[in-house]
Amino acid sequence: MTASNRRKLLGAIAAAGIVSAPLLALMNKPKPRPAARAEVPVAANPAADRAHEMKSLEAELQKKPDHAPILFRMAQLARELGKPAEAAQHLEQILKAEPDHPEALLELGRTLFESGDVQGAIARTNRLLAINPTQVDALYNLGAIYGNLNQPDQARQYWQRAVAAGPASESGLRAKESLARLSQ
């Protein structure tokens, strides 16, 4: 190949590169995405959402009476809606079917305390501790109940047990903080 032909060949290759580079760039260019639809802001109404969920759960409960997960969620919703008596009824219904249901006993103790039934709260929480003496949430709750009743010695006793049962748990840590406040 002569020098002149080599220059022509190199020139053709260079020209092809100049032309093909923009073509390749256009071919590999990402396709435009369709414009996102504008989202219409929805007014949040948590109470309406909870009421709607409650109606759905009631329909499910008709199909599965005494179903603990449904009743438990209904109790949570009732508490959130400010209906502790209704929440207590749902939890009692769980306990009729499963007398030693630990979550129902714990929640019922809390719900009864919040609604002013202190003795009922103590009884239900003690029942849970009879089943599981190291249930850290129950131990903390009893300490809090006795603390609120201005019985610091009883509160201290339960909080110490809570710290021993679960020092790294949320209730164990709260019990430890509560003990420190009692000491002050």
Image (spheres, rainbow, N blue to C red):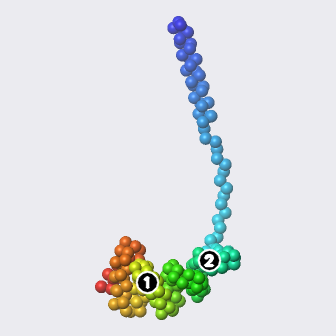
16 sits left or right of 161 in the view: right
Q: State the residue at coordinates (35%, 74%).
A: 167
User: Can residue 83 be spotted in the picture?
Assistant: no
Please give the residue where the numbered disc 2 appears in the rendered image. Answer: 67
Residue type pointed to by label 2: His
Does 3 sit above or below residue 69? above
- Give the total of numbered labels: 2
- Quadrant in the rendering for residue 92: bottom right
Placement of the C terminus among the 4 image quadrants: bottom left
Give the x, y percent position of residue 145. Answer: 43, 88
Mark 1 or mark 2, which is nearer the start of the sequence? 2
Give the x, y percent position of residue 40. Answer: 67, 63
Q: State the residue at coordinates (51%, 82%).
A: 100
Number of other residues with Cα within 10 Å of mark 1, as a class: few under 14, some 14 to 19, many 20 or more: many
Q: State the residue at coordinates (55%, 9%).
A: 5
Does 135 sit above or below residue 148? above
> In the structure shown, which secondary structural element does the residue marked by tag 2 occupy?
loop
> In the structure shown, which secondary structural element does the residue marked by tag 1 occupy?
helix
Q: CA distance from mark 2 to mark 1?
A: 24 Å
Please give the residue where the numbered disc 1 appears in the rendered image. Answer: 129
Task: Please say if the residues under marks 2 and 1 sit with CB atoms less than 8 Å apart.
Answer: no
30 sits left or right of 133 in the view: right
146 sits left or right of 51 in the view: left
Q: Nearer the viewer, residue 163 or 152?
A: 163
User: Can residue 180 be spotted in the picture?
Assistant: yes
Residue type pointed to by label 1: Leu
- Residue 121's disc is none
Give the x, y percent position of residue 126. Answer: 45, 87
Give the x, y percent position of residue 19. Answer: 60, 25
Number of other residues with Cα within 10 Å of mark 2, as a class: few under 14, some 14 to 19, many 20 or more: some
- Quadrant in the rendering for residue 12: top right
